[in-house]
Image (cartoon, rainbow, N blue to C red):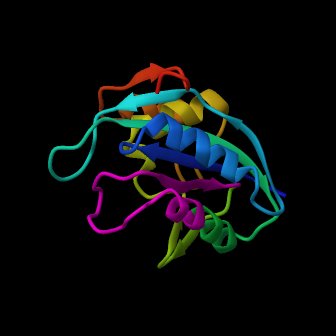
């Protein structure tokens, strides 16, 4: 069993509800256990055009699945929540990203782990630090050091029932 951290994000169709529903769906992934979820955070959108704010969180899982098998399960959850992949970094009902898969480094066309842009995103690093402050990114730095260098992105902690 490997400890895996998943980034969750949504800015369409009741984002807080989308994240809570995705967490419930992750509990149903075979050979996988949802350990815990960070607080929910509201953040400014990164991407093209006018978009609503995002609600973000990070979940910790234990899984016996291989990385690509887990990715397929997560993409199936995204699709069941109406995810469309038409515009890169566009608004979305649900985004589930594998941030860390133990200490494994993966560089495949469909999956890069650690997530390639997570060190630049406080809406990923802060919730991750809430769950695992001691974690280090493979081949990178500690979370406190990454957070110190991370660009500001209007981040606000919100309750999961308010989001």
Residue 29 location (% of width, % of height): 75, 59
Residue 146 location (% of width, % of height): 45, 37
Task: Answer yes or no: is residue 47 visible.
Answer: yes
Residue 62 location (% of width, % of height): 79, 51
Residue 24 location (% of width, % of height): 69, 45
Q: Residue at x 64, y 42 (%)?
A: 59
Residue at the left extreme of this rendering: 49
Q: Is residue 79 above or below residue 144?
A: below
Q: Is residue 102 left or right of residue 71?
A: right
Q: Is residue 43 covered in magenta?
A: no
Q: In this view, does 75 lie to the left or right of 95?
A: right
Q: Residue at x 30, y 31 (%)?
A: 153
Q: Which residue is drawn at 73% across and 71% down?
A: 66
Task: Answer yes or no: is residue 136 visible.
Answer: no
What span is colored magenta in the figure? 75-102
Image quarter of residue 45: top left
Q: Which residue is drawn at 52% across and 60% down?
A: 78
Q: In this view, does 17 lie to the left or right of 152?
A: right
Q: Is residue 34 above or below residue 153?
A: below
Which part of the image, by quadrant, shows the N terminus?
Answer: bottom right
Foreground residue among 146 and 159: 159
Foreground residue among 82 and 155: 82
Q: In this view, does 29 lie to the left or right of 44?
A: right
Q: Is residue 132 above or below residue 68?
A: above
Q: How many marks?
A: 0
Image quarter of residue 21: top right
């Amino acid at each position: 069993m490997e400890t895996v951290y998943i980034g969750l994000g949504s800015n369409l169709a009741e984002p807080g509800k989308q994240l809570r529903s995705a967490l419930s769906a992750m509990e149903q992934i075979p050979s996988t256990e949802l350990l815990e979820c960070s607080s929910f955070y509201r953040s400014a959108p990164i991407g093209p055009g006018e978009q609503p704010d995002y609600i973000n969180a990070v979940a910790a899982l234990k899984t016996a699945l291989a990385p690509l098998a887990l990715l397929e399960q997560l993409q199936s959850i995204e699709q069941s929540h109406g995810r469309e992949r038409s515009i890169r970094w566009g608004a979305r009902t649900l985004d589930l990203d594998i941030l860390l898969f133990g200490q494994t480094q993966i560089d495949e066309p469909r999956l890069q782990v650690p997530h390639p842009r997570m060190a630049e995103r406080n809406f990923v690093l802060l919730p991750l630090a809430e769950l695992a402050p001691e974690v280090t990114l493979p081949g990178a730095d500690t979370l406190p050091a990454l957070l110190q260098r991370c660009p500001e992105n209007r981040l606000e902690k919100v309750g999961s029932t308010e989001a």
